[in-house]
Amino acid sequence: MLEKLNELNDKFIERYANNKEQEKYLLIKQILAEKNCFRKINIETSYSILRDLEIPEEELENYYLNLI
Amino acid sequence: MENLTLYQLLKNNPYLKKQTDRILIIDEKENEYYRNDPNKVMDISVSFLKRLLTDDKYYQYVEKLTSSYIDVLSTRFIRNDELTGGVDLTRVDLTKCLEEVIKKDNSLFDEQFIRRFQDLKELTSYDQFLKEYKDKEYQLEVDGKKISIPISKLINFISLDEQKYEQILNGNGLIEGIKKEHFLYACCSFFDNHNIFDNYIVPQKFIRRFDELMSFQKIDFQSVNAIPNSINPSLDQITIDSKLKDAILEGINDNDSDIEKAVYIYIKMCKLLTYDDEYYVKGQISDHTNKHSDINNISKITLENNKVICTEFTAIFSMFLKKLGLNYLVQPEGGEYGKGHSWLKFVGDKFIVNADAALSILYGDLARAKFNKPLEGLKCLNENEETRNEFLELINSIYQRIIEEEKKKEDFEKVVSRYQQITSNLKEMPLDERLRVMTDKVKNDNVRGIDLLFDILQLKRMFFTEKELKNNISILFVKDNTSEKEPTIGTIFVLNDINVKINTLNNRYYVFDANGNITSISRSNLQEKFDDKTLEYTVYNDLRVPGITESKGDSNVRKAK
C-alpha cells in the first residue's frame, strides 16, 4: 500500500512541476520515505496526506488502518 | 637486664605484643652489627642469615615459614621505641639467600646448619611443588560459574614449549575445554592465590609467563571476575518513569552487544537528563535538594522533570545494566545513597568501564552530550591499550549513530511541520472520532487479554496528543463481570473537550469490551454497573473513572503496590 501511495505522490510531483504545489508533494515524499512514517505522525496529518493524494474521504479510514 | 628492658619496652609500647610473628631485634648493638656487616647477600647481613638456622629462637620462625604458618619471615629493628628497617623474606628468598651464603662463605658449616638448609631447600623445591599440587583440583568461581580444573593441566600449560604455548594463546576458543580467558584467569589466580612463586623455586619460564599474562598485553582477560556480581539491595527496587525509559531506549538496536547497548543507554541518559542546577547553586542544603537523598525520588524523574544528581544517574544506569545482565559496582564502595559523589564501574565483554556522568558538574558528560562533545566520564579501565582503543571506537560509533538518529528525527519533524503549514487538507478530528478509529484498529489487530491492553497503550499516542491524554481523555482497564463464565478485561474511555477530571458533568463514556466492541454509555448506566459490580476496579487501578463515585466498603479495591 505504501508503494501505491509513493507512486501516486510521484505523479503529483510530476504534475506540479514548476508550481508551488510541488513543495507539498516533495515534503510528502520525504515523509513517506521515513520508516513506519504513519506511526510517527498523528492521525490528522495522516488523513491530510491521504486527502492530498486524492484518496476518497470514505476510504481514508480503511487506508489508514492498513498503513499502521 | 635484657628481660627488664623487654618488659619495659612492652609496657611502653603495648602494640608490640601483637608482633608475635616477627623477629624483633631490640639490642642496639645487635642492630648496629647487622646494619654495618660488610658481608651481605641481597643487602642482608650474612651473620643474620646464618643465625636464622643456627639460633633455635630464630629457627622457630623459619619453621613457621616452612609450615606456612606465616607467609613471610619478617624482621624489624626497634630503635627509640619504634619499629624500623628490617627485611621480609619469603621461603624462596630465604632459600636463595642461604644458597648464596654457602657459596660465598667457605667456612665450615655444622651438621645442623646443613641439615636445616637441606630441609628448607627440599621444601622449596619444584619437586615438592609438584608433589603438593599436581594431583589436586583447583576450584574457583569465574564470572558466576563454578569450575574445577586439575592443577596438572595448569602446570602443563605453563610448562609448554614456546611454540605450542604461543599457538594456544593465539588460538580461538577453548583451552582444556574451558573458555580461553577463563582458563588463563584460573591459571594466574592459582599461582597467585597459593603464593607459589614465594614458596617454591619453579622454572623461571613460569614466572616470566605469569608476569606476561598478568600484564594483559598479550591476551586481555582483565575483565574476568573483575566484578563477580552486583549486590546492591537498595537499588534493586527502583523504578523509573515509563516515558523516560522509552525515550532512553528509543532507537536501541536489538542486534547490538550488551556493552554496545550499555554505551547507548549512557549516552541517551546524558542527553535526556540534566544536573540539578539548584542543587549545584545551593550546595545541597535546601528542602528542594534534600529530595535527592530519597531513593524514591527516582520514580518522579521524567522527561520534563529531568533534573538529577550523580547518585540518581548512577542508580538509574545501574538499573539498566542489571537488565542487560552486566555486573556493576557503585563507587565509592560503602558510600551512603545521596551523600557525596557517586559513580560506577561495570564490566561487559572484555571491557572494564568507569561511568561517571558528573565527573565535573559543569563540564561532565551530562552537559557535554547535549552538544555532542566527546565524553569524558565513560572510560575503559583496561591496561591493554588496544582494548582501550577498541572501546573508544565503540563509543564513537554508538555516539555517531545517536547523533544521526537525532538529526534524522529533527529533520523529519521539520518536514512534517512544514507540510502541516502548507497543506489545506489538515482537518481537526473530534476526540470521539479518533477513539472510534483507534478501537477499530484494536479490533482489527485481533488481540485479546493483556495483548489488547498493550495494543491500546501503544496506539493511544498516535491518536491523541500528550496534552489530550493528560486533560481530555482517561483510559482505565477494569474487571468486567458481565460474562457468567469468568471475568474479562474491560476498557473504559472517558472523553471531555475541556477536562475529564474537572468538567465531569460533560464527560462522555465508552466501554470497550473484550470482544472489541465499543459502546457509548451514559454516566448513570456506568455508575450502575460499578454499583452492582458488573464492573469493578482491579488491584492495579490507582486511578478512578472521573465522574463515577466509588461505593463505600468496596473491599475489592486495594492500592496496587
Image (cartoon, grey):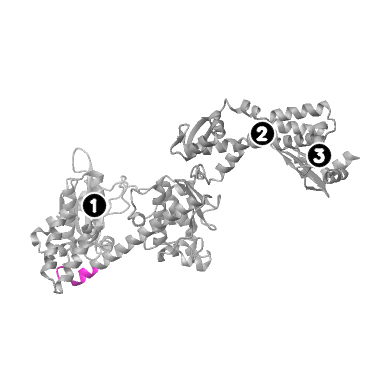
Mark 3 is surrounded, within 10 Å at the Cα level, by few (under 14), some (14 to 19) or many (20 or more) other residues, namely many
Residue receiving disc 3? B46
Q: Are marks 1 and 2 on the same chain?
A: yes
Residue receiving disc 1? B456
Amino acid beneath label 3? Val
Q: Secondary structure at mark 1?
A: helix
Residue receiving disc 2? B201
Q: Residue at x 82, y 48 (%)?
A: B81
**Dots 1, 2 in contact, CB < 8 A:** no
Amino acid beneath label 1? Ile
**Dots 3, 2 in contact, CB < 8 A:** no
Let me know if residue B423 is in the magenta part.
yes
Q: Where residue B543 appears, x then y in whole percent?
A: 31, 54
Q: Read off the magenta span.
A: B417-425
Amino acid beneath label 2? Ile
The image quadrant of residue A10 is: bottom left
Q: Where residue B132 appears, x then y in whole percent?
A: 62, 27
Let me know if residue A28 is in the magenta part.
no
Closer to the camera, B32 or B452?
B32
